[in-house]
Image (cartoon, coloured by chain):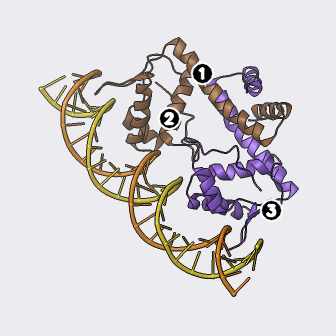
Chain colours: A purple, B brown, C orange, D yellow
Amino acid sequence: MVSFDSFKPTDGAGPIYVQIVRHIKSEIAAGRTENGDELPSRRVLSALLGINPNTIQKAYRILEDEGIINSHAGAKSYVTVSPELMEALKAELAESELLSSVTALKKVGLTKAEAMELFEKLWERR
Amino acid sequence: MVSFDSFKPTDGAGPIYVQIVRHIKSEIAAGRTENGDELPSRRVLSALLGINPNTIQKAYRILEDEGIINSHAGAKSYVTVSPELMEALKAELAESELLSSVTALKKVGLTKAEAMELFEKLWERR
DNA sequence: CTAACTGTATTATATCAGTAGTACGGTTGT
DNA sequence: ACAACCGTACTACTGATATAATACAGTTAG
């Protein structure tokens, strides 16, 4: 079963349905979710997260259009990812996350050394 | 005059007025904009960026509330920042940018070494 | 079989971001 | 003084996001 333990929709981090899509992709990329894993039903997850079923459906629909999950009327939904897709997701998420930071930091005038020092410091911090 | 040469409102990067606020803070943090610099008028900037004057007004209003710019009815608007505020902005922007990346990358399961290697690679890329 | 669950679809409502148009009064250069 | 700017304010409209309340048909376990 795909986990939503550490997931809370955050204000100011874009639409909730996009956050759900990203979370599931992230779970797959991290290897915490494998091919064939079951997804929580729309109703169950909406109750768990305290949001509307339609918002969940919107997220699941996007994932199905991208071929990451599989849904059939009446039956449960499952994750359907190949190892190659998993690696691709990992690279896609990591690069898109870092690229925006790099461009922003360059714009502020930080040197590479300054940026990497700060990056390491933040990584160690918990 | 505060420059908007390298600024284009980007889809999927949040509200336009927030992007404008961040851009001006970024210009100040990078030292490309100093205390006393003039801002483009609402009408001029809206025409330049191809967006509505009200959207510019919303951004300028936020900056004024934060004490970063100064507006008086009828007169031009100017940047009003102390050296200390400039340093604070730089630290604030850099840390907030990197922190979200670090947490996202940790969630995907990257090690510190992998993350820093990717970070350096993206920094070199132009 | 059938009851309980599943995915899917529809309609209505509320809020927010952004656009569009207009208006008013203050400042400034000539 | 006066024209050309400026900041400010207001209303109305659109589209996207999210909620709410149903409804219907397919599946699956007891």
Q: Estimate the spatial distance between the alpha carbons at disc 3 and disc 1, rounded to whole Å.
A: 44 Å
Residue occupied by mark 3: A80
What mark, if any, has residue B20 been given in the picture?
Answer: 2
Q: Earlier in the sequence, mark 1 or mark 2?
A: 2
In front of the other: B113 or B123: B113
Q: Are marks 1 and 2 in contact (CB under 8 Å)?
A: no
Q: Is residue B32 visible?
A: no
Chain ID of residue with mark 1: B
Chain ID of residue with mark 3: A
Q: Estimate the spatial distance between the alpha carbons at disc 1 and disc 2, rounded to whole Å.
A: 16 Å
Disc number lying in front (1 or 2): 1
Question: Element under label 2?
Answer: helix
Percent x, y of residue B72: 31, 24
Residue occupied by mark 1: B90
In front of the other: A103 or B117: B117
Question: Element under label 1?
Answer: helix
Position of the C terminus of chain A by quadrant: top right
In front of the other: C18 or A82: A82
The kind of residue on which mark 2 rests is Ile
